[in-house]
Image (cartoon, grey):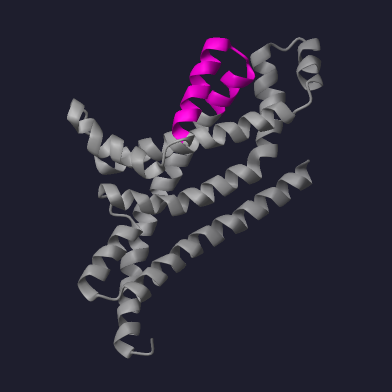
Amino acid sequence: MFDPELWELLADSFGRILLPGLTMTIPLTAISFSLAMVIAIAVALVQFAHIRVLRQIARFYVWVVRGTPLLVQLFVVFYGLPNVGILIDPFPAAVLVFSLNEGAYCSETVRAALESVPPGQMEAGQCVGMSYLQVMRRIILPQALRIAFPSLSNSLIAMVKDTSLAANITVTEMFMVTQRIVARTYEPLALYIEVGLIYLLFCTVLTKVQRLVEKRMRVCA
C-alpha cells in the first residue's frame, strides 16, 4: 500500500475515473431519474384514481419491473431486443431501463404519499369549485411530493450506484473505465476502492443537498 508507484497510479487514474463520472454517470442518473419521476407520478395517479383497467395495467407494470433484476432488464433491452429487430445504443438503452425500473419503485412511494393526504383535502377543493385535476395539481400532489421527498431522494442516491451496472452493456461510465485500468495495471484492490470512494463522494454531495432541501421544506411548511 505504501508503494510510490501505486500512489502515482491512483493519482493518475483519479481524473480518468472522475471525468466519465461527471460526463456519463451523472447525466445518466439525472436523465433517467427525471424520466422515472414522470413515469412514477403518472402510474401513481392512475392507481389513485381507481380507474379499473388502467390500474390493472399499472399494477402489472410495477409487478414485472419490481420482480425482475435490473441487470436482467438491461440485458433484455440491449442484447435481447436486437433479435426482434430493435437496436438501441448503449446510453439510450441504459436510460430506458433505469427510467422504467426506477419509475416502478418511485410510483409506489408516490402512491403511498397520495393516499396519506387526508381525503378532506379533495372534498375541500371541490367545494370551492375546483375540478378533480385542479385539486390534484394544486392541493393533493404538492403535499404528496413533500411527504415522498425523503424516500425519492434515497432512490436517487441508490440510482447513482446502480448506474455501475450500465458497464455490462458497454456504457463507458466510471466503473467500466476502472475495469479497463485494472485490466492494464493488475491493481484491482486499490482501483476498486478508489472508484468506490468517488461514488461515495457523489452520494455524499446528494445527501447534503437532500438535507438542505428538507430543512427548507420544513421552514416553508
Label count reads 0
Q: Residue furthest front?
A: 67
Quadrant assignment for the N terminus? bottom left
User: Does residue 143 appear left or right of residue 186 in this picture?
Assistant: right
Note whether 51 is above or below 97 in the view shown. above
Residue 48 is situated, as x and y percent measured from the top left of the image, at 63, 20
Q: Is residue 71 visible?
A: yes
Q: Position of residue 79 (x, y in %)?
A: 23, 38
Q: Which residues are magenta?
A: 41-65
Residue 214 position (above or below residue 13) = above
Residue 106 vertical placement versus 60 (above, below): below
Q: Residue at x 35, y 83 (%)?
A: 7
Question: Where residue 127 sits: x, y (%)?
Answer: 81, 11
From what the image shows, is residue 219 above or below residue 1? above
Q: Can you tell which quarter of the image residue 186 is in?
A: bottom left
Q: Position of residue 112 (x, y in %)?
A: 66, 31
Q: Is residue 152 magenta?
A: no
Q: Nearer the viewer, residue 98 or 127?
A: 98
State whether residue 88 appears in this view.
no
Residue at figure coordinates x 67%, y 17% from the top left: 134
